[in-house]
Image (cartoon, helix red, strand yellow):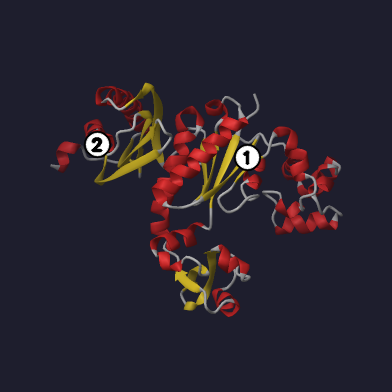
Amino acid sequence: MSRIILHVDMDYFYAAIEEREDPSLRGKAVVVCMYSNRGEEGGAVSTCNYAARDAGIHSAMPCRLAKAVKPDAVFLPVRKPFYSEVSDSIMEILRSYADNDGELFEKLGIDEAFLEVTATSGGDLDKAQQIAQSIKEGVKELEGLTCSVGIGPNKIIAKMASSRQKPDGITVIREDEVDGFLRKMPVAKLWGIGKVTEEKLAGMGIDIVEDLAGHDVQELISIFGKTRGTWLKMAASGIDDDPVKEKTSSDQIGRMASLTHDTRKSDLVLSLLDELLDDVFSKVTARSVSFRSVTITVIYSNFKTVTKSHTLNHPMAEKSVLREVSYQIMGELLDSSTVNIRRIGVRVGNLHENKGQKTLAEFF
């Protein structure tokens, strides 16, 4: 069975959040700037919406130049902590659809992530597309934002496919379509190729991916080194065995599982929650960490996904605290909907290494 990888990319993330927070911005060119210590006269564009892009503004453009290009655009400062909170909520939705109880998930940045759905989809690309649509609907309902999804047999293809139909699109590249998808693409569009590599390849007469795929691998190795040269040849051929995997395991610990059947009976839901709590806490203990945040994820029978989090005043490593907070959140979620539940998950975050960690009794 071929792998099925999704790459989910939020559409003009920072600017979209600002439009959501202030609906009067919709229809206007919105530019979010990372200002320097020189104030609004310095710094560079972090992101902008499509109206601003149509006017010629782009990421990394000096803010001063962007204002000259489009004086009537709305210029706003980056609010990274706020955007990160929104990102965390969205990433929980994405993780809930990933194979292996959410383990085959990889956050690539604040506004994009990979997830493998080979098992969940049964290797069926039509089902994978349904999963992508459910993700888009969940993100839209929970955060009021749109995203674009690329679906392919590996991370490289999925990543490039997600930008094919922006904004708010889904692009599926089947395994037998990879060659046609890549062939005439400029090498600069191949994910992982930067400006320096692009210039070196141009000097070798390599301008499109087809040229790179057909080039002698030994010559590529002699110029770029064995690892890089081999990667260039494989990537241009649409070959990528890189697994979907978290780059670090220190951020959070979690588990998801399906109920034996869709239900909203509290005894059945809480029984499964107890099993997940046992597993999560055993991992917390094994890693000698404490946690400050607890997140519960619920996927309903209509595939709507809801996440709810609680942040503790102090890092804790007490199972009773984890259980109490999780039960409270789950109770609120059960009370807020009459729809049956399909899957649930629990996750702890904001992890801290235990160095003389206080117990619950010591706090009181």
Which residue is painted at 79% across and 56% down in the image? 200
Q: Quadrant of residue 236?
A: top right
Q: Nearer the viewer, residue 14 or 72?
A: 72
Q: Amino acid at mark 2?
A: Asp
Work out whether residue 306 can be spotted. Answer: yes
Q: Quadrant of residue 173?
A: top right
User: Whole-percent x and y of residue 152?
Assistant: 64, 37
- Whether residue 347 sits left or right of residue 215 in the image: it is left
Which residue is painted at 45% across and 68% down in the image? 25
Work out whether residue 248 can be spotted. Answer: no
Pointer 2 residue: 335
Q: Dot 2, crowdedness within 10 Å: few (<14), some or many (≥20)?
A: few
Q: Nearer the viewer, residue 29 or 99?
A: 29
Which residue is painted at 60% across and 26% down in the image? 123
| Element type at mark 2 | helix
User: Whole-percent x and y of residue 284?
Assistant: 34, 33
Pointer 1 residue: 155
User: Whole-percent x and y of residue 289?
Assistant: 34, 37
How many callouts does the rendering have? 2
Q: Amino acid at mark 1?
A: Lys
| Element type at mark 1 | helix
Which residue is painted at 48% across and 62% down in the image? 15
User: Whole-percent x and y of residue 36?
Assistant: 48, 72
Rendered image: mark on residue 224: none
Q: Nearer the viewer, residue 347 or 302?
A: 302
The quadrant of the image that shows the N terminus is top right
